[in-house]
Image: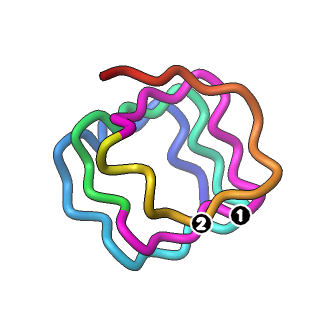
């Protein structure tokens, strides 16, 4: 799945499988990622809001920018 640079901010993305997705430089600020799978997703430069992101499953990701 290629979502590079996508503005996904403030969207309800609960329970979505982003396994191996390209989320480079995507804006996920304020998005609800509860119970989402981000396994091996490329989050290089992605913007995330920690308070909503905490409950997602993530392994083997690259660097990302976290906002609070």
Q: Is residue 58 magenta?
A: no
Discs 2, 1 touching: Cβ within 8 Å: yes
Regarding mark 1 in the picture, which secondary structure is present there? loop
Whether 14 is drawn above or below 46: the answer is below
On the picture, is 8 further left or further right than 25?
A: left
On the picture, is 24 further left or further right than 6?
A: right
Overall secondary structure of the magenta section: loop
Q: Residue at x 26, y 57 (%)?
A: 32
Q: Which residue is mark 2?
A: 57
| Range of residues picked out in magenta | 34-50
Q: Quadrant of residue 45?
A: top right
On the picture, is 57 further left or further right than 11?
A: right
Between 3 and 16, the one nearer to me in the picture: 16
Q: Which residue is mark 1?
A: 39
On the rendered image, what quadrant is the N terminus found in?
bottom right
Q: Residue at x 29, y 34 (%)?
A: 29
Q: Residue at x 54, y 75 (%)?
A: 17
Dot placed on the residue nearer the N-terminal end, 2 or 1: 1
Whether 19 is drawn above or below 53: the answer is below
């Amino acid at each position: 799945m290629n979502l590079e640079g996508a503005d996904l901010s403030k969207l309800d993305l609960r329970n979505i499988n982003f396994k191996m997705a390209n989320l480079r430089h995507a804006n996920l600020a304020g998005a609800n990622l509860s119970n989402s799978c981000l396994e091996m997703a490329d989050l290089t430069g992605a913007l995330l809001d920690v308070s909503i992101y905490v409950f997602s499953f993530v392994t083997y990701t690259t660097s990302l920018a976290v906002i609070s």
